[in-house]
Image (tube, rainbow, N blue to C red):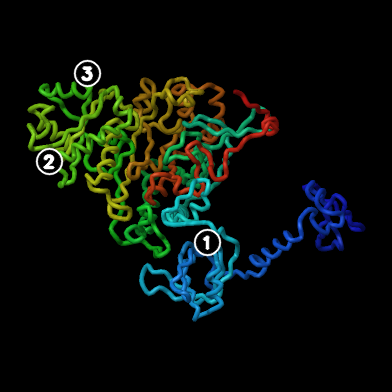
């Protein structure tokens, strides 16, 4: 807006808008503002009408305003004086004089509208002409539901539409809208609305619990600068040539600085941005509940996180709140809950495992503890060496195995067909594994050596080790996989047999060959696990070159470069073999998915400098980018630890979906695009020029 000019003696109306101003002490004064090009070109000098607009269009717009806006008196509270607003559903005609429709209130609660000719003939006639899915204002008499779960009924006395609705919109329980029609997905897919309402509820509960624990919410900048923290960044150009912001991957450095600044317990609902390939549980922008504790170690963090998560689950009352929706999903419906802790059977359990234990027992640092049994290392006697040569070409490999007990009514022949189909559908990472393909054997008492003749006469000890000593029955299976003997502590986040175990279990459950895990809301349906003592560093993979942009040591931090060594021995091993150092990092896993992670931080500036300069071999210029952090650490920073809860993933798991897109109002697609608003958009040459940029092939 240009600077206003105060005129008291005349009114200038050619090329400017005159806006009366009733400022105290100024009589008959006007502020003068320049006309926009549209106003200057389309209004007559007298300001009487917009040129080129037919009178009938003006009349149509004025009528719509009068009908849908001016004559509408919305109730201050829904239900006050028998007046309700909401969206009306499809009319159900019972007879010539009786019709029903659902009315969905803004809260999501659904009432039933009943229009009877004998009760109010005029209202009944109006009701017949209202289009489905229109916003309406209804007046009527409320009859509360007599049965639990039934809808309250409003006996109609008047109805008024508040806007037009499309007459050709057909909606059935089977209707599927494309992502470009996200507004219709949210409006007509009740599971999406239920998930979004649950998300809002959970955020409020977690926030309240943190406030009770003395946390201070502090908002940190989203526009940061480029620093190596483990993922690709989004850069934001500025009009200062050659300078750019980076969108924050997380508020990691800010929250450590806040703790050094005297904020003893920090929290924030943070938006984070990472330019990563899209997956079901990943979006380029996401939300996390960020927390940091001063004067704290891992046990303090884990106790507080367990407290707030378990309090939320208790308030959720899982045995009461979960309902099954049209797609079979189990989602909490919160409208009927009493906000008090439930005394029903617990739906959750917590375990603690080190990284090494998780890899050894489950083949994954994100173990799904609902899967029965565990993986075992198999001692191979000389008499079974031929069996090992059948499954791998490795010399002296590590052979691991696990067993599954299948449904009793499945004969071995039927199990064989299932296993053949499963093996035929295995991804190439298993069939082309250079260490060998998995071997699946079926217990069949009608065959020589119970179906384990390929192992040899010493099969019993091997099968017993694979099944952890559990007795096998006909149709049960034993799965073997070989890999190289691990050298030191480092391994990737999963092994082939760990990945195979989860795939096979999912396949057998879907084909009703194994028992389904407890449904959400039932006891033991939520299996949490803390995974601790991660490796501090890992070799840089060939497909992760961005991690080595300024680090020339060939290794990268498994979590981030601010994570502290676990103990004095791990600090010492940095001088000889950094890959053998353990970190004070910890992840929280739920049903096989990581929902959060954190660590104790390096609060001693000299050690932080040693990690960056001597271990990661960052350049002096790159280390200088962290001057703000070093200044904070050198100011007397206390020991501290933190945690970030992946809020999207947690909401997805607690509402029975495998994709975070289902708990985000406007999710991104597989290529990071927003199909609803068609983002990202094309950049013009003029915009590029303004930022000193140009396209390059």
Q: In this view, does 691 lie above or below 6?
A: above
The residue mark sitting in front, 3 or 2, is: 2
Q: Name the residue under label 2.
A: 474
Q: In this view, does 612 lie above or below 222?
A: above
Under circle 3, the secondary element is loop
Q: Is disc 3 in contact with disc 2, using a CB cutoff of under 8 Å?
A: no
Q: Which is more N-terminal, label 2 or label 1?
A: 1
Q: Which is more N-terminal, label 1 or label 3?
A: 1
Q: Is residue 279 above or below residue 181?
A: above
Label 2 neighbour load within 10 Å: few <14, some 14-19, many 20+: many
Residue 359: in sight, yes or no? Answer: no
Front-lying residue, 538 or 611? 538
Q: Mark 3 points at which residue?
A: 395
Q: Name the residue under label 1.
A: 133
The residue mark sitting in front, 3 or 1, is: 1
Q: Is disc 1 in contact with disc 2, using a CB cutoff of under 8 Å?
A: no
Q: Would residue 330 be found to the left or right of residue 269 on screen? A: left
Q: Residue furthest right?
A: 9
């Amino acid at each position: 807006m240009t600077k206003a000019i105060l005129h008291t003696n005349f009114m200038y109306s050619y090329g400017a808008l005159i806006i009366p101003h009733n400022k105290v002490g100024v009589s008959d004064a006007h502020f003068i503002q320049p006309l926009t090009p549209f106003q200057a070109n389309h209004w007559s000098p007298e300001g009487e009408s917009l040129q080129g607009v037919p009178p009938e269009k003006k009349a149509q717009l004025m009528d719509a305003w009068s009908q849908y806006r001016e004559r509408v008196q919305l109730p201050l509270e829904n239900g006050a004086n028998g007046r309700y607003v909401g969206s009306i559903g499809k009319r159900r005609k019972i007879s010539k004089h009786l019709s029903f429709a659902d009315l969905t209130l803004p809260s999501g609660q659904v009432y039933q509208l009943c229009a009877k000719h004998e009760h109010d003939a005029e209202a009944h006639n109006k009701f017949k002409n209202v289009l489905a899915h229109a916003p309406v204002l209804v007046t009527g008499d409320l009859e509360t539901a007599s049965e639990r779960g039934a809808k309250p009924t409003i006996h109609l006395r008047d109805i008024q539409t508040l806007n037009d609705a499309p007459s050709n919109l057909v909606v059935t329980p089977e209707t599927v809208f494309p992502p470009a029609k996200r507004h219709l997905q949210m409006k007509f897919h009740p599971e999406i609305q239920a998930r979004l309402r649950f998300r809002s509820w959970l955020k409020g509960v977690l926030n309240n619990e943190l406030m009770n624990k003395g946390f201070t919410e502090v908002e940190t900048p989203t526009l940061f600068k480029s620093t190596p923290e483990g993922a690709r960044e989004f850069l934001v150009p500025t009009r200062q040539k050659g300078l750019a912001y980076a969108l924050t991957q997380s508020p990691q450095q800010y929250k450590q600085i806040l703790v050094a600044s005297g904020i003893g317990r920090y929290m924030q609902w943070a938006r984070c941005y990472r330019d990563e390939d899209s997956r079901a549980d990943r979006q380029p922008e996401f939300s996390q509940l960020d927390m940091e504790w001063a004067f704290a170690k891992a046990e303090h963090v884990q106790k507080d996180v367990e407290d707030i998560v378990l309090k939320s689950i208790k308030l959720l009352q899982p045995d009461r709140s979960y309902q099954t929706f049209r797609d079979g999903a189990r989602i909490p419906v919160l409208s009927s809950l009493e906000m008090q802790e439930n005394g029903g059977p617990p739906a959750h359990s917590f375990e603690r495992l080190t990284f090494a234990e998780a890899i050894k027992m489950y083949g994954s640092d994100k173990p799904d503890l609902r899967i029965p049994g565990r993986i075992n290392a198999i001692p191979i006697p000389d008499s079974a060496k031929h069996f090992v040569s059948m499954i791998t070409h490795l010399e002296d490999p590590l052979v691991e195995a696990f067993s599954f007990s299948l449904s009793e009514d499945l004969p071995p022949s039927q199990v064989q067909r299932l296993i053949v189909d499963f093996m035929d559908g295995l991804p190439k990472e298993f069939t082309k594994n250079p260490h060998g393909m998995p071997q699946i054997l079926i217990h069949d008492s009608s065959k020589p050596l119970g179906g384990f003749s390929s192992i040899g006469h010493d099969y019993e000890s091997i099968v017993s080790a694979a099944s952890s000593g559990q007795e096998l029955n006909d149709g049960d299976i034993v799965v073997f996989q070989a890999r190289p003997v691990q050298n030191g502590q480092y391994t990737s986040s999963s092994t082939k047999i760990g990945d195979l175990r989860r795939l096979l279990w999912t396949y057998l459950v879907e084909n009703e060959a194994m028992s389904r895990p407890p449904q959400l809301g039932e006891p033991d349906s939520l299996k949490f696990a803390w995974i601790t003592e991660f490796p501090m560093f890992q070799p840089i993979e060939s497909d992760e070159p961005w991690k080595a942009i300024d680090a020339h040591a060939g290794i990268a931090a498994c979590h981030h470069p601010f994570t502290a060594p676990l103990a004095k021995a791990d600090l010492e091993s940095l001088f000889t073999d950094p890959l053998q150092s353990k970190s004070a990092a910890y992840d929280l896993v739920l049903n096989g998915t990581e929902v959060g992670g954190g660590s104790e931080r390096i609060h001693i500036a000299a050690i932080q400098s040693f990690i960056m300069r001597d271990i990661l071999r960052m350049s002096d210029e790159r280390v200088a980018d962290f001057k703000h952090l070093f200044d904070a650490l050198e100011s007397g920073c206390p020991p501290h630890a933190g945690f970030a809860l992946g809020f999207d993933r947690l909401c997805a798991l607690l509402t029975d979906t495998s994709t975070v897109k289902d708990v985000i109002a406007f999710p991104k697609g597989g290529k990071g695009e927003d199909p609803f608003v068609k983002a990202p958009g094309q950049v013009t040459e003029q915009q590029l020029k303004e930022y000193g940029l140009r396209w390059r092939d």
